[in-house]
Amino acid sequence: MHHKDKRFAIANREALIGVILAIINFIWWYGFAYGLGSKNPESYTYIFGLPAWFFYSCVLGFLIMAVLVILVVRFMFTEVPLEDEEGEET
């Protein structure tokens, strides 16, 4: 009798979480880069010498995504052994 390896279910769930994080990152970046960045450059506001659209999309977006990835890995990902369990038939 063949049973499904639970590691594949864990890996699939974690891959889906990774894809969701990538989509969130893209939406964040696109929203600020093209939302604020599509104005006339003469009307830009600046943060730390950078245009606000760049600061929010690239600098702040990177920091927020780094924190999100750390939290997801720490609290949602599961450590699984990579070698086959003893006695398990493939």
Image (tube, rainbow, N blue to C red):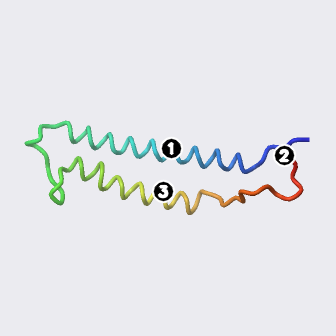
Q: What kind of residue is marked 1?
A: Ile
Q: Secondary structure at mark 2?
A: loop
Marked residue nearer the N-terminal end (2 or 3): 3
- Name the residue that disc number 3 marks: 69
Furthest residue in direction left, as rendered? 42
Marked residue nearer the N-terminal end (1 or 2): 1
Q: Secondary structure at mark 3?
A: helix
- Name the residue that disc number 2 marks: 90
Q: Quadrant of residue 78?
A: bottom right
Q: Secondary structure at mark 1?
A: helix
Residue 48 horizontal side relative to residue 4, left or right: left
Checking the image for residue 20, the label placed there is 1
* Residue beneath the point at 22% across and 42% down: 36
* Residue beneath the point at 18% across and 57% down: 47
* Residue beneath the point at 61% across and 57% down: 77
Q: 64 or 2, which lies in front?
A: 2
Q: Is residue 36 above or below residue 10?
A: above
How far from the left and from the top, in percent, is residue 74?
Answer: 56, 63
How far from the left and from the top, in percent, is residue 56?
Answer: 27, 51
Q: What kind of residue is marked 2?
A: Thr
How far from the left and from the top, in percent, is residue 67?
Answer: 43, 60
Badge 2: how crowded within 10 Å, few (<14), some, or many (20+)? few
Q: Looking at the image, is mark 2 or mark 3 nearer the viewer? A: 2
* Residue beneath the point at 48% across and 56% down: 69
